[in-house]
Image (spheres, rainbow, N blue to C red):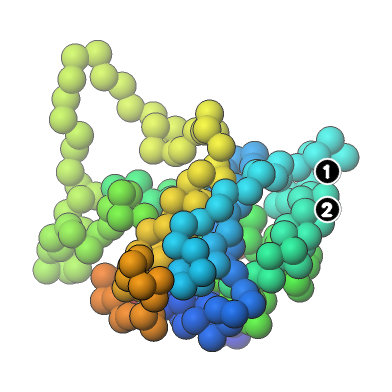
Amino acid sequence: MLATKLSSALVAPSKVANTLDWRKAFGAVMGIDVTRDRIGLAIVEHPEHICESVPLKSIPLHDTADMKKAGISKSALSELEAVIRQHHVCASVVNWPVHNGRMGEDCGKVLHVLDAVINRSNSIISRKRPFTLWGSSANGSFASFPTDSWGRSVEFARAPAYTPGMSFSSNSVSRQEPSYDPSLVAASVLDEWVEKHWQIDSKLGIATAPKLTSKNLFFDPSSVDEYNSESASLQAALL
């Protein structure tokens, strides 16, 4: 299978850390959180300069002129390109919104937007400016769930605890448009990613080279090729 543009630009979280380490004198990593209608953004420099990420103003995915177009508007692309230039972004860390380890509509939305971005602009995400998917530890992963003899997670067959008057809808597993600024989520994702990849001595102001982390959740780039405008199919693996 030939690699798509999207899968060609997808790398491991540790690879993005190595990229920033090489460009620590003049570079930054951008955090991205995609919601139904907006893109949250944050920036972090090398931890030797500053340890905490800085949330930026979130960007609307669509404007009035482009409401019927899929993916992302031209104005949003222009704003993203401006952030890339202003902050000398060398790579991106994208929030991967699994829910209790399950990949649903929100994950498909992330890939849909990223696919539109990389196909309409060559200066935001590319092989030279890669991205990684970072599943926050708060969302959990399948790694902690036991599997049967066929390798299937038993979590899929587990019924929720019953409460009187409860009802179920497929929409209940989808993230609704948040009332908070998604840029705060992007900043939190960056902070967690930095914490997992560097050992920081705040007193001396020194951050060691990126350390290997076997617990990072990473997605095989070849599985991103299976994504299309209607669905996304990813196989999760641990580094």
- Looking at the image, which is closer to me, 69 or 95? 95
Residue in view at x 60 percent, y 52 percent: 41
- Tags 1 and 2 in contact by the CB under 8 Å rule? yes
Q: Secondary structure at mark 2?
A: helix
Which mark's residue is nearer the viewer, 1 or 2? 2
- Left or right of residue 211: residue 107: right
- Using the image, determine if residue 227 lies above or below residue 170: below
Q: Position of residue 134 (x, y in %)?
A: 43, 62
**In which quarter of the view is residue 60 placed?**
top right
Type of the residue with mark 2? Lys
Looking at the picture, tell me which residue is in the foreground, 145 or 159.
145
x and y, in percent, of residue 206 in the image: 39, 76
For marks 1 and 2, give the CA distance: 8 Å
Give the quadrant of residue 64: top right
Percent x, y for residue 230?
Answer: 59, 54
Q: Position of residue 47 (x, y in %)?
A: 46, 69
Query: Label 1: which residue?
Result: 66
Residue with the mark numbered 2: 74
Residue type (three-letter) at the residue carrying disc 1:
Asp
Q: Residue at x 26, y 19 (%)?
A: 166
Q: Quadrant of residue 237?
A: bottom left
Q: Residue furthest top?
A: 165
State which tag comes first along the sequence, 1 or 2.
1
